[in-house]
Amino acid sequence: MILTILTEVLEGLKITVIGVTVVFIILSILAAIMAGFKPLFYKRVKPVKIVPETREKVRKPHEAKSVEEKLALPPGLSPEEISVLTAAVLGFLEYKRKKLEKIDVFRELPGLENILYVAGLAFRAKLRISVGGVEKLVEIEEVPGGFIVRYRGKEYRVGLKI
């Protein structure tokens, strides 16, 4: 009788050790998978290079640069279009942030919004932005690598580097 109880206890210990080992192995695999997700959700910050100041030669007042020389505008874009595109992108990012703040998951995991493209989700909005005191209607859509802004019947592709 004692022998049968002892064999049952040993059998129970074997099953317990096997069960704990299986659970530990599965949890280790899950931890490794979750550690692999970290680079997908969080962007690495690139180190900033410090460039020594370069001194320009002193110009005489009559050699002052014109406005066109000071502003390096992309060809074919007016300053008004650039200000509208900039305001549209900034307004859109604020709109997107406010929409995602209302959802608990995005509030708790701030990097989760970076995976929306994988799920096939994209944001699109029609915004009224004010530039120079005048309201302008723009349509903006987020695409991989930037934004598409539609303004006055034209379509602009805008990239954003931070």
Image (cartoon, rainbow, N blue to C red):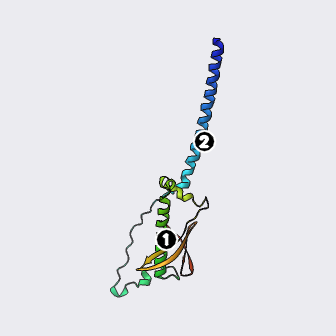
Figure check: 46 above or below 71: above
Quadrant of the rendered image containing residue 143: bottom right
* Pointer 2 local density, CA inside 10 Å: few below 14, some 14–19, many at least 20: few
**Within 10 Å of the Cα at label 1, are there few (<14), some (14-19), or many (20+) other Cα atoms?**
many
Residue 7 located left or right of residue 86: right
- Residue 98, above or below 156: above
Q: Estimate the x, y position of residue 92 in percent, counting from the top left.
A: 49, 69
Q: Residue furthest top?
A: 1
The amino acid type of the residue labelled 2 equals Ile
Query: For this rendering, which residue is in front, 44 or 142?
Result: 142
| Distance Cα–Cα, label 1 vs label 2 | 41 Å
> Answer yes or no: do the residues labelled 1 and 2 have beta carbons within 8 Å?
no
Residue hosting label 2: 29
Q: Quadrant of residue 10?
A: top right
Looking at the image, residue 137 sits to the left or right of residue 11; the answer is left
**Point 46% across, 77% down: residue:** 83
Q: Which residue is mark 1?
A: 89
Q: Position of residue 99 (x, y in %)?
A: 49, 62
Q: Secondary structure at mark 1?
A: helix
Answer above or below: position of 120 versus 155: above
Sequence order check, earlier mark of 1 and 2: 2
Amino acid type assigned to the residue bearing label 1 in the image: Val
Residue 143 lies left or right of residue 133; in this view the side is right
Return the residue found at the far bottom.
62
Q: Give coordinates of residue 31: x percent, y percent.
A: 56, 43
